[in-house]
Structures are given as structure tokens and as C-alpha cells.
Amino acid sequence: MTEASLFGSGLQPARFVFLYGTTPPRADATPEQVSRAAERLAERVRGLPLNGLVVYDIQDEVGRVAAPRPFPFLPTIAPRSYSCRLAALTRKPVVTYKCVPDTTEAGWTSWLTETRRDYGIDHLSLVGRPSSRDVSGTMPLLRAVELAAAHPAHFTLGGVAIAERHGTVRSESLRMLKKAAAGCSFFISQAVYDAGKTIALLTDYARDCAEEGVMPRRVVLTFVPCGRERTLEFIRWLGITMDNDTAAAILTDATPARKSISICRHHLRAILSQDCARRLPLGLNVETVSIYKDEIDASIELYHALHEVVREFGQENEDFGS
């Protein structure tokens, strides 16, 4: 699948991009365990109408929030290594997250060259370090994007969009415009459990793009199932907004994960009903932040449920590659 068919002009703005997100195995996993994990994931998503996968770059995020982390931080194998393996197994493009490293511009350029040459990766989503204010050697995110955009490997670059930090004091929409000017061609949102915040961001982004006379970049909306209290705690620790009524509705339901799926369906319908959804190229990404089998299985059920919502709005993309 080409760059244009995944995020670029090859898809009409009214058509969605469909992705499934995952995390790499733990750093202490044996080669056999890594292979089994990749094979299980490939089998899990085999029947899904997918355009591509997402592999996250998991960081400890010490100091990002005052609250203690609900789950202990466990380092993972290199995301680019796992992306390479998944691309070979699924024959689909993989968006690889990369936290901007503590390195020089020359070191960053070298990493980019190696990533394309040795791992075959051409889709990157770049994120800044949560505690970068305290790390003097960390390269500014926009500069990292600029260097990656100018690299001869011709990467397709993306960034994150976090509706929770959008407001009058700090505009996430304007941050997206700056990232796009630096070289980002898509954005993947933080998981949505507050449709109102996402609608506000998308509305302002569509307006700001029109006022600046620039083409809006594709915004991929992320959703995640939640089936237990510890997962809810982790979702909130990540900075995802879930109000108390929603949390109570999920946790008191006889089938919490399925209740969360119903809520996610409602949120996606609310978003797609807005005028901004017809003015922006959008996409769908489903992930799971849980290690529990029932919630992992629920992510597949969630994917099917949200895909059906997209079809209801007439925005399904039939080009899912091989």
C-alpha cells in the first residue's frame, strides 16, 4: 500500500482510514515469545478490514503526572523491530511511534537512515518526551519532525492530537497546524471517552485550517475498551477524560467491556454527526491498554462495532490492501 493510499490524497476526505494499535512485547521476552506474540496479533486482526497497524513507543513517563502509575512500567523491545515483524506477517503498513530521543541532530538523522534501511519503516508518528522540560539534551519535537521530513527516505510523518489539552490558553489545533507545517501529514488522537472535547478540537482545527488556507491533515480517532477498575485507573492516568457517570455505568454493568463498547459507539456517532466530520479527513484506530484476555478480545469486538458506525455514515473505505 502506498503512502497516498494510507494517509495522503489517494483517499477522499470522506473516506476513513482504519488502524489497529498495539504495544511491543516486554524487553525480557525471548525471541520465541516475541514471535508468538506477533503471530497471535496477526491472527487476531486477520479478519479485520484494516488499512494498517500502529506500534506504540512505551515510555515510563516519570513526572508527567503526580498520581502513581496504576501498572508498573515494563520496558519493551524496540518498536521498529516489532513493526518490521508485523509488516512481514500482515503485509500491511505499520505506523511506528517514536519518542524524540536525547540525541544530536546528526544522531537523529543516523537513526532515521538506519530505521528505513534496516527495518523498512516508512511511517513514523513522532512524540515529545513527557518530561522533556527537564532534559536539556532533548531535541525539540518540531525540529525532529523537520529533519525527518527532509530525510531522503521520504517518511510519512504523523503526530499526536490530544483533545484534553485543547483550550483558549493552549490551542491543540494551532499545535497541529505547526506540526503539519513542519512535515506531519496525519495525527492520531488520544483515546476518546469525551466526545465533546474531541468535537471542540475538530471544529476548531477545521476552522483554523480554513482561515490559514491550508489543507487539513488526516485525524485518526482512537478508541479503547475498558472492562475493569484497574484499566479505568490506567486510562485516566494516561490523561484520557472519562467522567464519573461514564465510569460508573461501565463498572456497574454486568458486562463492563461491552458497556464500554456501547459508550464508544455513542461517542463516535456524536462526532460523525458534526459538520467538522464532513470537512476533515478522518480515520479510526482501536487499541487495548490491557494485558487481560477479555479486554484484548473486546478490542476486536469494539473494532467491528465502530466500523459499523462508520458504515452507517457512508464513510467506509473499501481499499484494505492485501
Image (cartoon, grey):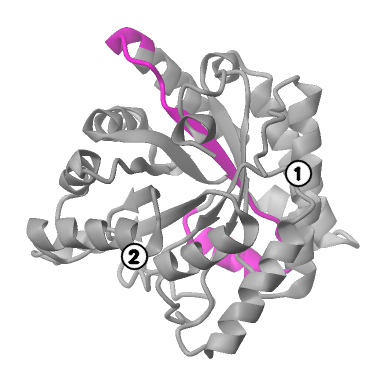
Horizontal and vertical percent position of residue 109: 16, 56
Horizontal and vertical percent position of residue 125: 38, 49
The C terminus is located in which quarter? top right
Asked if the magenta segment contains residue 224, the reply would be yes
Q: Which residues are magenta?
A: 210-239
In the depicted structure, whether residue 32 falls above or below residue 279: below
Horizontal and vertical percent position of residue 51: 62, 41
Identify the disc placed on residue 263. 1
Residue hosting label 2: 118
Compared across the picture, whether 270 is left or right of 140 comes to: right
Q: Is residue 97 or residue 34 the one in the foreground?
A: 34
In the depicted structure, whether residue 280 falls above or below residue 135: above
Asked if the magenta segment contains residue 241, the reply would be no
**Which amino acid is tagged 1?**
Ile
Name the residue located 70 percent from the left edge and 56 percent from the top edge. 225
Compared across the picture, whether 295 is left or right of 217 comes to: right
Could you say whether the residue bearing mark 2 is in a helix, strand or loop?
A: helix
Q: Is residue 70 or residue 123 the one in the foreground?
A: 123
